[in-house]
């Protein structure tokens, strides 16, 4: 069971101010993947005219977060999703709008089962970052792997 994925696109920019600041667009958020886009904005360019690495990282992390929230947002009373570690590779200069596509590497039901068995699960979300070239083809500009955990909520008596 998961949240209604359509609510994430509306709620995340309100709950996470950086998402709104960057103007991240939620093209699709569903159980299989999250597709978010960072419109090209000169204010977020780097010294060589491409998108700044920090903006690209935030886009990729937000795509991960949208997918994780969709799968585990309905159990926030049991566990808090937290990013543990991220690895990102910047492969090409990103010019123009950047699209991030996030996918879960593990089955969400298996992750929930680990949590309910008393374990603190860790799981991976992978993201590709692409831009569209003048000829319409996609250029892979970056890749991120983010390790997440579900930290059990301590019950107070």
Image: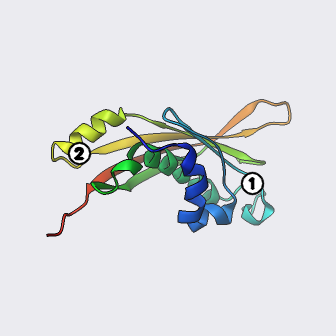
Structural crowding at the residue carrying mark 1, measured as other residues with C-alpha within 10 Å and reported as few (<14), some (14–19) or many (≥20): some
Q: Secondary structure at mark 1?
A: loop
Q: Is residue 135 left or right of residue 34?
A: right
Residue 58 makes an appearance in the image: no
Q: Position of residue 149 (x, y in %)?
A: 32, 51
Residue in the image at 67% along x and 59% along y: 52
Residue 104 makes an appearance in the image: yes
Residue in the image at 81% along x and 31% along y: 136
Q: Position of residue 69 (x, y in %)?
A: 45, 49
The foreground one among 121 and 95 is 121
Residue in the image at 75% along x and 52% along y: 39
The quadrant where residue 16 appears: bottom right
Q: CA distance from mark 2 to mark 1?
A: 41 Å
Q: Position of residue 53 (x, y in %)?
A: 62, 57
Q: Residue furthest right?
A: 134
In the picture of the structure, the residue carrying the numbered disc 1 is: 50
Location of the N terminus (image quadrant): top left
Residue in the image at 54% along x and 53% along y: 62
Q: Is residue 46 left or right of residue 100?
A: right
Q: How many marks?
A: 2
In the picture of the structure, the residue carrying the numbered disc 2 is: 115
Q: Is residue 144 above or below residue 49?
A: above
The quadrant where residue 46 appears: bottom right
The quadrant where residue 125 appears: top left
Numbered label attached to residue 29: none
Q: Is residue 54 above or below residue 75?
A: below
Location of the C terminus (image quadrant): bottom left
């Amino acid at each position: 069971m998961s949240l209604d994925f359509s609510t994430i696109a509306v709620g995340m920019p309100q709950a996470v101010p950086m998402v709104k600041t960057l103007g991240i667009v939620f093209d699709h958020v569903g159980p299989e993947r999250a597709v978010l886009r960072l419109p090209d904005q000169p204010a977020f360019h780097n010294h060589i005219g491409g998108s700044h690495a920090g903006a690209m990282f935030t886009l990729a992390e937000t795509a991960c977060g949208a997918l994780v929230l969709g799968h585990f947002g309905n159990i926030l009373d049991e566990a808090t999703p937290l990013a543990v570690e991220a690895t990102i590779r910047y492969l090409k200069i990103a010019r123009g709008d950047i699209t991030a596509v996030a996918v879960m590497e593990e089955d969400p039901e298996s992750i929930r089962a680990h949590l309910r068995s008393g374990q603190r699960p860790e799981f991976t979300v992978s993201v590709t970052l692409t831009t569209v070239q003048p000829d319409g083809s996609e250029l892979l500009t970056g890749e991120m792997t983010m390790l997440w955990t579900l930290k059990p909520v301590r019950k107070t008596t």
